[in-house]
Image: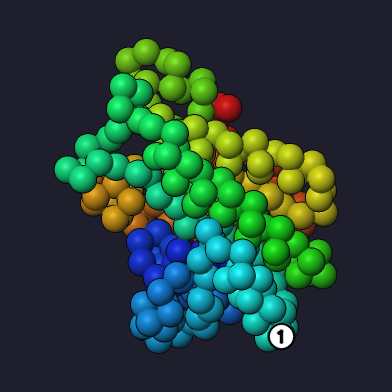
Amino acid sequence: MTTTLITGANKGLGFETARRLIAAGHTVYIGSRDPERGRRAADQLGARTVQLDVTDDASVTAAARTIEADGGLDVLVNNAGIEGRAEDNSVIGAADVTAEMMRQVFETNVFGTVRVTQAFLPLLQRSASPVVVNLSSGLASLTRVTTAGTPTHAYPGVAYPASKAAVNMITVQYAKAFPHMRINAVEPGYTKTDLNGNTGTQTVEQGAEIIVRMAQLGPDGPTGGYFDAEGRLPW
């Protein structure tokens, strides 16, 4: 039995990924900051739940101890993330972004990814087929964001794409450090979720496709890569 933890999984892409992986036979832990929301999501899906705030050391450590006591972990999906939009749901551009805004986004998207990964590394290293999936974005591609005339080039935000570019680098460096693991970054596409004020053009079913696929990699699968549903993406 494959045991999987998905952070930020009480709604959106995380919830849909959990649903699909449970259907594929995984035992799934719903990681949720809010214990009650996590419990409701787990009850709905037939999953387990664990309180987990990726920005809090004590919360992450406690979650790792809980999952270790229950038998360990095979797959980690670092799904929890924020974009950091303005109150009117507009994207905050270079003229208005502040260091504090950057810090808040990086705390969840970057430091949270490292915090959770580090806490669960000992469990993953005991697995026969350990997998880590890091949620990135097409906006993290320097190639795409510098290609004029594309939607990626037109996106004015600073904090979110910078944080996801950092996630890509984290992915590459961890994959090199732990070659027996399958560690990849994925771009789900512009999906309608709370992260973007539900302005996305894809459904969560479409967005979860690449996450689910990469969460089920075997030992011979790719590692250190950056993928969307169509294949590899340019860095």
Q: Is residue 74 left or right of residue 235?
A: right
Q: Is residue 159 left or right of residue 130?
A: left
Does the rendering let one see residue 91? yes
Task: Give how far across and how far down residue 83 sits, in percent.
Answer: 37, 44
In the rendered image, the vertical position of residue 157 relative to residue 31, given as above or below: above
Figure quadrant of the C terminus: top right
Q: Residues within 10 Å of mark 1 (few under 14, many from 20)?
A: few
Q: Regarding mark 1 in the picture, which secondary structure is present there? A: helix
Residue 117 or residue 203, whichever sits in front: 117
Task: Give how far across and how far down residue 231 sits, in percent.
Answer: 54, 38
Which residue occupies the extreme top position in the image? 148
In the rendered image, the vertical position of residue 143 relative to residue 28, given as above or below: above
Residue at horizontal 72 percent and vertical 52 percent from the top: 182
Task: Give how far across and how far down residue 163 sits, in percent.
Answer: 51, 38
Residue that numbered label 1 is attached to: 69
Residue 201 or residue 121, whichever sits in front: 121
Residue at horizontal 51 percent and vertical 66 percent from the top: 53
Residue 91 or residue 184, whichever sits in front: 91
Number of numbered discs overlaid on the protein picture: 1
Task: Give how far across and how far down residue 174 sits, in percent.
Answer: 74, 46
Residue at horizontal 35 percent and vertical 44 percent from the top: 84
Does the rendering let one see residue 231? no
Q: Amino acid at mark 1?
A: Ala
Figure quadrant of the N terminus: bottom right
Q: Is residue 225 left or right of residue 127?
A: left
Q: Locate residue 85: give its quadrant.
A: top left
Which residue occupies the extreme left position in the image? 88
User: How was this image coloured?
Assistant: rainbow
Residue at horizontal 53 percent and vertical 78 percent from the top: 50
